[in-house]
Amino acid sequence: MDQTQNECSWMNSIKVTLGSLDHREVKSFISSIASVSSKLRKHNEESYSPKLLTIGPIHRGTSSHLLAMEEHKWRYMLALLHRTQNPVSTLDECGKIILGLDDAVRASYGGNIKYEPHELAKIMLLDGSFLLELLLRCSPQDMVPQIPNEDNHHGSFDPILGHQEMLPFVLTDLILLENQIPFFVLKTLARILLPDVFTSQVDHLVADLTLSLFSYPLIRCPAVAHFLHLMHLSSIIDEGQKVKQAQQELKRCATRLRAAGVTLRPIENHIKQVKRFGFDIRFVKGVLEIPPLHIEETTEVHLRNFIAWEQSRIGISRQFTSYAMFLRGLVCSSQDIELLISIGVLVKDTNISNEDLLTFFVTITKGVDQMDSSYSKVCEDLNAYSEVKHLKKFPILVWHCCRLCVECVRYSCKCSYRILIHDHIPNVWKLIGIVAAMVLLVLTIMQTYYSARG
């Protein structure tokens, strides 16, 4: 009997996906919460893995340090249930309905989830309740004026909001592509738990609370896959760009553009918005205006996960990928980093070194397959522009090339040193053996030399 079940189990993911194609909330987002491809992940593994808490089944139980937040998730769930009139019966109803969404949930993860239905429903119920309670606790008062108060007899200390430095790291974990739950699970739980608040007339309220929590502009969209997708929709400025094979369109870095007579400057009166990227890049009459990019602790994580989302889907805007490709074209050495910082295009809000910043820009687009035409015209104009005579720009280019060569040599030496230490000198005894061998080789050469002269 077990053998027959095992022979048929491989068909389950196929049946789940096919059965969800007509589901109202899922049909456009089959496999919307997919694992990040290895060609993207290998350049910065940490940018795609949660640091504090897991949401959904992909990273659940993968690391012991993530278990500490599980208790707080349960406390948030309990607090949310105490906002209802009858917590026990409401919990039973939630469990029954979420269990009935098993096929739709599995389809969102590509049908490859190993958890059995009741365990998967438990994950959706716990994580969905935690996210809803977090949204309610952080919601502006005018956005949810009739929110029921929670029963506070379990203590007033909030382990997340009670620590000022904790919330930013929690929010960063909540935007990771692999750390999502389907948005329809949140909306379903909201309608069951608080039907007087999340009514059909304000079907967009969960999305509004989410965007408010992450400080993104409010938008109206018919369907949302998860948190990351919602923030992506809120960020992009042009949906109509043509998708094409990823390629480096900007052929001149910032230093070379300056040598050609291009004036680089940040867009004036540009308001900084936390965790936002300014896509409004303009090139008019020799002046390249770029919205300032504020480099924070979480900037790389956000940009990499937005790019991973764009690379995992067909038919969506690839604005973040094209933006990253443009920045990659601007930077080819630390001299470019220094120039962009000096003029205010790059603003360091963290203690990141210029060397690490260079590594970030160099690797951010490695592994991407597709981009769009957002900056094709700007790049074409920049590549062709030249308003400076050769004698004037020659010293700048020579100095830039010299610095670039020095950086390449230094990088090669550093990589060789790391390979030597990691692969050939893993311990002290091997180091002693290598030093002894080198000394012996030198002595042998000296002996041969003096013997030949004698």
Image (cartoon, rainbow, N blue to C red):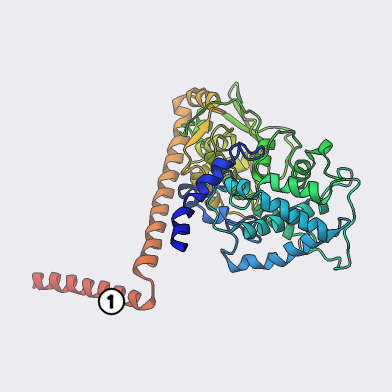
In this rendering, would 344 be left or right of 206? left
Name the residue at the top extreme: 285
Question: Which amino acid is tagged 1?
Answer: Ala
Q: Residues within 10 Å of mark 1 (few under 14, many from 20)?
A: few
- Which percent across, then down, holds residue 57? 60, 57
Disc 1 is placed on an element classified as helix
The answer to whether one can see residue 14 in this image is: yes
Quarter occupied by residue 123: bottom right
410 is higher (above) or lower (below) than 291:
below
- Which percent across, then down, holds residue 113? 55, 54
Q: Residue at x 57, y 42 (%)?
A: 19
252 is higher (above) or lower (below) than 147:
above
- Which percent across, then down, holds residue 91? 78, 58
Nearest to the observer: residue 406 or residue 234: 234
Q: Which residue is mark 1?
A: 436
Q: Which of the image's four quarters has the C terminus?
A: bottom left
The answer to whether one can see residue 168 in this image is: no
In this rendering, would 149 be left or right of 266? right
Q: Residue at x 79, y 46 (%)?
A: 191
73 is higher (above) or lower (below) than 101:
below
- Which percent across, then down, holds residue 13? 52, 49
Nearest to the observer: residue 229 or residue 91: 91
